[in-house]
Image: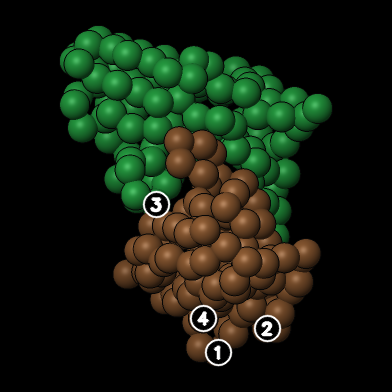
Chain colours: A brown, B green
Amino acid sequence: GQNIDQPTEMTATEGAIVQINCTYQTSGFNGLFWYQQHAGEAPTFLSYNVLDGLEEKGRFSSFLSRSKGYSYLLLKELQMKDSASYLCAVVDSNYQLIWGAGTKLIIKP
Amino acid sequence: DAMVIQNPRYQVTQFGKPVTLSCSQTLNHNVMYWYQQKSSQAPKLLFHYYDKDFNNEADTPDNFQSRRPNTSFCFLDIRSPGLGDAAMYLCATSRDPTGGYEQYFGPGTRLTVT
């Protein structure tokens, strides 16, 4: 079966750095997305990785290791508005998007 | 601004009473998706359309139907809603179903079944 694993919940302090991990076992791989979802709202696109390495976009960076089936999302200089769920999603060999259940990030002052 | 619009934002229906949710897009994307998402769960894909080609996920209940009359609009019909169908329904679009094209989501319709 296909599986995406993320921690259910994480807590971090405003101004700090947090790393949200995602491991996957899928039938094939055609890229990995990270989405942000605030409570009661729709997911919004954060990043896409298809090759190994780090992609940096402002305060957010995403890393991929295809050989390890592993990705992480790194959030720097945390702000209260970063409190949200972060969903990892993998495109499999059939170009189906396999979603993780998301990691709820709680930011404390 | 180009966007994905869903109506209504909140829908209350009675057990067994048919309901239709609508989605429109101004992005001119080829692909439209319907997802069901329950609290703290991953979005579950119900259907997607690539142009006019309809794709039904294997585990989508027969109670759910979809229509895409043109590029811009897509509808989700729930023929006989049960209490277990209470959820957020998300419509999304993408330029192409392959590779690195991100999905753009509408704000969702929260369905309550009484």
**Badge 2 vs badge 1, beta-carbon distance below 8 Å:** yes
Tell me which corner region of the image, top left, top right, bottom left or bottom right, holds residue A18. Answer: bottom right
Percent from the top left, x then y, of residue B49? 57, 36
Q: Which residue is mark 3?
A: B42
Earlier sequence position, callout 4 versus callout 2: 2
Q: Which residue is mark 2?
A: A52
Could you tell me which quadrant the N terminus of chain B lies in?
A: top right
Alpha carbon separation for disc pair 1 and 4: 8 Å
- Secondary structure beneath dot 2 equals loop
- Secondary structure beneath dot 1 equals loop
Percent from the top left, x then y, of residue B37? 38, 41
**Badge 3 vs badge 2, beta-carbon distance below 8 Å:** no
Same chain under badges 4 and 3? The reply is no
Are there few (<14), some (14-19), or many (20+) residues within 10 Å of tag 3?
Answer: some
**What chain is tagged by disc 1?**
A
Q: Which residue is mark 1?
A: A67
Q: Which residue is mark 4?
A: A70
Same chain under badges 3 and 1? The reply is no
Q: Is residue A78 visible?
A: yes
